[in-house]
Amino acid sequence: MTGPRWVRRVELAVLVLVVLVLVGQVLATSAPFAPSIEVEQSLGLAPGLTVKAVTTISSNFAAHLQLTGLGFPGAAAVPTIDYYFDARYPVENSTMANWYGLPQHLLSVASARHRPISIDRLGASALADLLLQPPRAGSILVLASGVLPAPVYSANRNLLLPWIRAGGVVVWIGAPIGAYTGEPIDPLEPPAQAQPVPGGEGQFLNATDLAPGATLLATPSPIATGLDVDYPYGLSEGLLNTTRVEQQGGQVLGFEEGGATNLARIPLGKGALVDVASPVVDLPRLAPALLNLIETRTVLGPVDLLGTLAVIVAPGSRPTTTQSWPLPTALADSQNATVCAFAVETDYLAPLGAMTCTPIY
Amino acid sequence: MALALDGWAVPQEGSDERRSARSAVAASGWNPRVPGLDRLDRWVTRTPRRRFWITVIAAGLAIRVLLAPWTGGGDLATYAESATSLGLGGGPYTYLLVYPPGFVDLLALAGRVAGGFLGSPVLVGVDPGLLRFYATSSLQWTGSLATPTFALVEKLPLFLLDLGTAGLAYLMVRECADERRARWALVALFWNPLGLFLSAVPGEFDILPVFLVLAAVYLAMHGRGLSSGAALGLGTAIKLFPLFFLPLVLAILWRRGGLRPAARALPVATALVGTSAVLAGLFLPLSTAQSYLASFATGPTVGQNHGGFGLWSWVQLPHLTPIHWWLFWTTAPITAGMEAVAVGLAVAVALVYLRRRPRVGWDPLRTFGAATLTALAPLLTRNVVEPQYLLWVLPWIAITAAVTVHYRWPLVTVTLAGLGFLLFGLGGPLYWLEPMAVFTPYLSWGAFTQNLAAWAPIAALVAPICSVVGAGALAYVGVRAVRGLTWAGGAS
């Protein structure tokens, strides 16, 4: 027999659902769970040119961390970021959404780490203006559309390369750098509207700098492990030759396979090209990977990996580790060097991280 | 006290009216001879109530619970990513979530539970096999998938909603017809392979707004304006399609109790939708929401049926260029036209419902037929690109079919079609069984892809057959619904 009793029960079910959604709304709008990892470190020089790092890590959730010691000449300022985005121009080995979304993800991850960053977005003409100015020290330019816009680059124009050679640092991701230029697109036409530039790749990298392509690489390089650069995707058109990268004084930063890598910093003149030889996909991996490289200023210049340690921190615990990292001779001889300890959460989508640095001279 | 539709007395179990209705059905009807159907009918009809309910619930739940932890993929990974992001203090729209914030709010609870009680807010897993698969396929995916724990936590409430929806169908049919037909509706819904698949495998949450729509209509039939409006408002705050039921729910309330209950429902529904939208817009991190909006403003999938925001998210995007605005204003009239047709259909159904007085005696086809046509309105004007959209109309097909003369036939065909869609789902998008390959030793990644590749041609054959069967059932019920609503077809 049905009747008002069942009507009341249905009403109750609706009420319960309303309450659940509203409670969830309140939680969603008031930081439901505030995960944090805190890293306290003391870094000091020990006898025998060794850095002694005493690290205490606390977390309010089960954190899987990579604790890495880094050293580099100079100071530890985090670079500022210029980001090219202009929806009128085409993409190649990228998508409009990922091109637009990458800085959003970078900001979100940095915000979760309580280390906010600022990103200046540039349209095509602003990018051309930037490249006509001398590069600013400590800033990087991120290009993630896979296509250089016509005001900057075409078969007979290249504003980017001289700017890099003058000291600029570019993070490039998408189609091979220099392979495509683009005019403003017609949105009613098919998406692939970038124009190939014959021989364009050769303007930035020699053929010997390249290696056969692959869509996925198997082995993280030591830097990729230490900094949790968890981005294994590669370009089928071609990867970077690790031997050539090292011969040019560059540094392999990504995954490796068969003498090739998908991510490396390659010196060009006074500046550097940080080439991510991969399509712009999987922003949940790409954004933390890039941010780790940026925060540790690995994109700016050579960084020495002093040591790495995987640490599991139980909720509420405060384990302390003591590590002795031998200081590379070049750093030891430097008159102005910095050592840092970088702790980063390695679970997928867990963007937390912390870094402390100490000048050693 | 049973339901009195539109002021008319409803025959009670054992009353003369009920007997005459039943005998009229038996005398005028023809039910198909399907092997085993009579036996199933006898079981449905003669099994004692308690045993019947226990059997239906136990069998339905057992299959669901067995499947739940080890299946997933698709949208479930997106839900897990959003819950993880919320649990880590980020925004829910960071990844691919495309719907109004109601379900996000529930995910916030899941993020809270996971972060606070499971020890870690990380609700997704990754596997090299997944990465390799997606890196070498044309599918755009992140290579993540929900952990079995999250899959179970996310799906268990959906199972209760499956039961709640089937239970509401049972209530409606029982109150308007008889126990046997009500039992058939219950079985057809709770054991429906498509409904079972959608909740237990990909963990689609469509059953939540579907339950709320049924609740809204049921409560409206009982003259409950406030709660009916609340159900409809909450449903719309989760997916947009329940809004199409607003005219009909108001019409039912008006017919049932005059203007006052209808006047109560409207502000409650509006308040719930408005509160949810305003809070989400004001407080959820806009920066992350923008990447979601961008993916739909700049990608090809501007439709998203009537569940998500679709093309209309454009207007919230910053930095739109004149070309994008031109494209928006060029395509918006087409989209708006389709929306208008769907809205027009829903309003027309409500107006016909309001205008036509019921015939003497019980006339459930009038209400359920109107609800079926309303549920069809959004589906008739857009492509059904995801199987879960069929769930919007499935309960109404079952309920309407259950009160027609040949009630067993459409119920059987809808069930068969649902089974076909299940087979298609298992073989088509490939990734439903990913968690089995990743989290258990029973299925290797190689065997998984190999078996599915072998299965794909069979699934491709099954799908059109099932579509035809399902369309046949739909056509039957649709015709009955139109005739029931307009009483053009004589006695039902």
Image (cartoon, coloured by chain):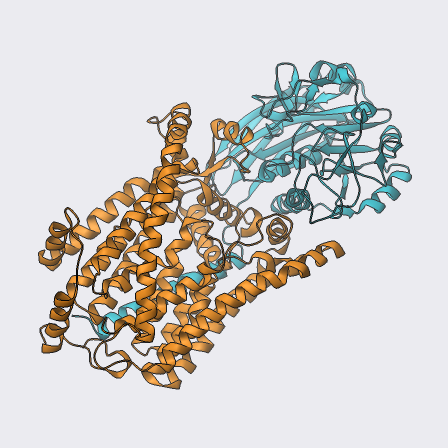
Chain colours: A cyan, B orange
* Quarter residue A162 falls in: top right
Lateral position of residue A217 relative to residue B23, left or right: right
Q: Nearer the viewer, residue B475 or B447?
A: B475
Q: Percent from the top left, x then y, of residue A329? A: 75, 15
Please tell me which residue is depicted at 19% across the width and 69% down the height of the picture.
B177
Residue A97 % position (x, y): 64, 45
Name the spot of residue A45 as percent of width and height, x first. Answer: 70, 23
Q: Quadrant of the C terminus of chain A?
A: top right
Give the quadrant of residue B65.
top left
* Residue A108 visible within the image: yes
The residue sitting at 35% across, 77% down in the picture is: B252
Count of marks, rendered view: 0
Q: Is residue B475 above or below residue B415?
A: below
Question: Residue A280: horizontal and vertical position, in percent?
Answer: 65, 36
Task: Kindly tell me whether residue A11 is visible in this rendering.
Answer: no
As drawn, is A183 to the left or to the right of A102?
Answer: right
Give the quadrant of the N terminus of chain A.
bottom left
Residue at 77 percent across and 23 percent down: it is A266
Above/below status of A257 relative to A102: above
Decide which of A353, A142 is in the foreground and name it: A142
Q: Is residue B35 above or below residue A343?
A: below
Q: Is residue A103 shown left or right of residue B308?
A: right
